Image (cartoon, helix red, strand yellow):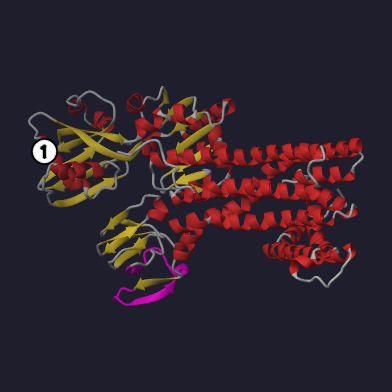
Amino acid sequence: MANTPPVGVLERCDDALSAPALNRAILIITLLAMAGHFILMFPGVFGLQDIMLDQRTADLPLLVLFVTGGIPILAQLAIKLLRREMGADFLAAIAFVTGVVLTEYLAASLIILMLTGGQVLEGFAMRKASSALNALAKRMPSVAHRKSPDGEISDIAIDEIDIGDLIAVFPHETAPADGIVVDGHGSMDESYLTGEPYVVAKAPGTNVLSGAINGEAVLIIRAEKRARDSRYAQIMDVMAEAEQKRPRIRRLGDQIGAWFAPAALLFAILVGYLSDDSSRFLAVLVVATPCPLLIAIPITVMSAISIAARRGIVIRDPTVLERLPTCQTAIFDKTGTLTYGRPELVEVLAGPSMDGNLVLRLAASLERYSKHPLASAVLNAARDRKLPLDEVNHASEKPGQGLNGQVDGHEVAVTHRNKLMKSDPEIAGLLPDTAAGLECVVLVDGKYGATFRFRDTPRAEGESFVGHLGDIHHFKKVMLLSGDRESEVSYLSELLGISESLASQSPEQKVAIVRAETAKAPTLFMGDGINDAPALAVATVGIAFGKESAVTADAAGAVIPEASLVTVDELLHISMAMRRILLQSVIGGMVLSIVAMGFAAAGYITPVAGALLQEGIDIIAILNALRLAIRHNIDADIVED
């Protein structure tokens, strides 16, 4: 260990030796050397009948190749050996050296062609697999149009956008940052961001995603995030993070090579010894060198990341795609995950001699000045009933005190049952019995006005999604965890067909439950709140729902900003397709290589023919891996109503 170079030195050497430009140069040299070899070997074919050369002269271009191209290739493999990474490339090194020693120069040249060609093909395939992200990057502007308070518009770099800046987005331009429309009516194409092929209407108050393409009208947006923190930057970080994690992903291929390489080498030695034919030893090694084949693994993963990005899914940890098909237990948070997180007013229970519409009108007038989650539900209910809103003289909402104010000459208070029971037991006696769901109590001029009952509506696709997890995605157990009270959780679990639910769970309890379930079988946990972050981190796979919490997103392996269970189902299908194609490429290619090894051992395949055959097998495997990048029919089984 004392003589082993530091890891940082090895990494820098490996980066230099495996640079794309160097690999392309070696590939070009290899093709030129082989072309020169064939011209000198068969001059008559190329109209050079007068030139008579011997074998040694014809081999000169290949010898030049071994110096200029073979040495860098061997240096790359030597660095891997110093890292104690013995994979299928190790066979290539032995086959190359053996070919040179046995003067099988053409076979040795084909091995260099195989290695460099595979690396160049990998670079091309990676660009193809990430085409969606590259296209999005090209569409992003480098400047933004900032509008000053006096109405002047000036161009600034998008990195100079501050929160609160007014930004003008001209027709057909790309939004440079997440924001809210403050002026203008139009539409935007968000298909690259959300995965939905629709143009979304925009008006004052609506959200705008960075990376969305504007339509025909000028829109003025107020920046809610800096460009580096916006949705566009989040999606583009996928590629950077994926690239950083590629060594860990490719280690899966190295693991396959770790047992295959020694076994193939032992088999080749045995064949050479029993047959007393060194060319058979070399032929077996050549067809047992599937190094470009193992490139199919990162290509497939990167293709899956690209497809996920097209559908608005941010893959923070690529290993999520490998683990997701193995999960057997699905655990869900309730609010904002299986429900919309937008409570609706479903019932107004008026008190004695009280008009329900009057109480609702007064409460809605006051709720305009509240930031409570139920305020919008009250306002929407009043709007649906076409109730006019009254003038509010004053309003107050102190923590723990509820909402109070004077509306159209009436003193109105919006509070909750427990507080009312403690402060005025006599009025509390008029309250209806408790029921499933959320509620609030409205007092008008100190008298009991009405009880408002709310329900957080389950997602339209929730029942279909939960119902098919077992049949299609092979989950054996589905659980619902929530901090809400028992009546609401039980109602939702019964509605969606979830057999096991736990209510009133603290973040610490959620973590303990998820950790215990993960010890039994691989788990998928989905949540959207900050309190879900610890559970997301301890699950086998954590999926963060929605875009409101950076803490939750950091704890998850995958993020679905535009919350939809249909998109979750698409992610499940993407991971299944990735696993299936990956296994096809790797196992299928390895089986073909093993069959070819048998024919080589029997003497039916020469070293040169074996190199050409293995090259064909590798290309087939890589092209199969690319199928995931170009296919467009990975769709969810469920349909959002």
Q: Is residue 150 magenta?
A: yes
For the record, the magenta segment spans: 148-171
Label count reads: 1
Task: Classify 10 Å Cα crowding around label 1: few (below 14), some (14-19), many (20 and above).
Answer: some
Q: In the displayed structure, would residue 178 be above or below residue 613?
A: below
* Residue at (53% x, 53% y) in the render: 238
In this image, 393 relative to 280: left or right? left
Query: Which image quarter: residue 288?
Result: top right
- Pointer 1 residue: 357
Judging depth in this view, the residue of 132 and 394 nearest the camera is 132
Q: Amino acid at mark 1?
A: Asn
Label 1 SS: helix
* Residue 190 screen position, x and y as percent: 37, 56
* Residue 635 screen position, x and y as percent: 42, 41
Query: Which image quarter: residue 112?
Result: bottom right
Residue 230 in view in this figure: no
In this image, 359 relative to 553: left or right? left
* Residue at (56% x, 46% y) in the render: 317
Q: In the displayed structure, would residue 106 be above or below residue 496?
A: below
Q: In the displayed structure, would residue 382 be above or below residue 25?
A: above
* Residue 181 screen position, x and y as percent: 30, 61
In this image, 437 relative to 68: left or right? left
Quadrant for the C terminus, please.
top left
Residue 245 in view in this figure: yes
* Residue 281 screen position, x and y as percent: 85, 43
* Residue at (52% x, 40% y) in the render: 577
Judging depth in this view, the residue of 241 and 164 nearest the camera is 241
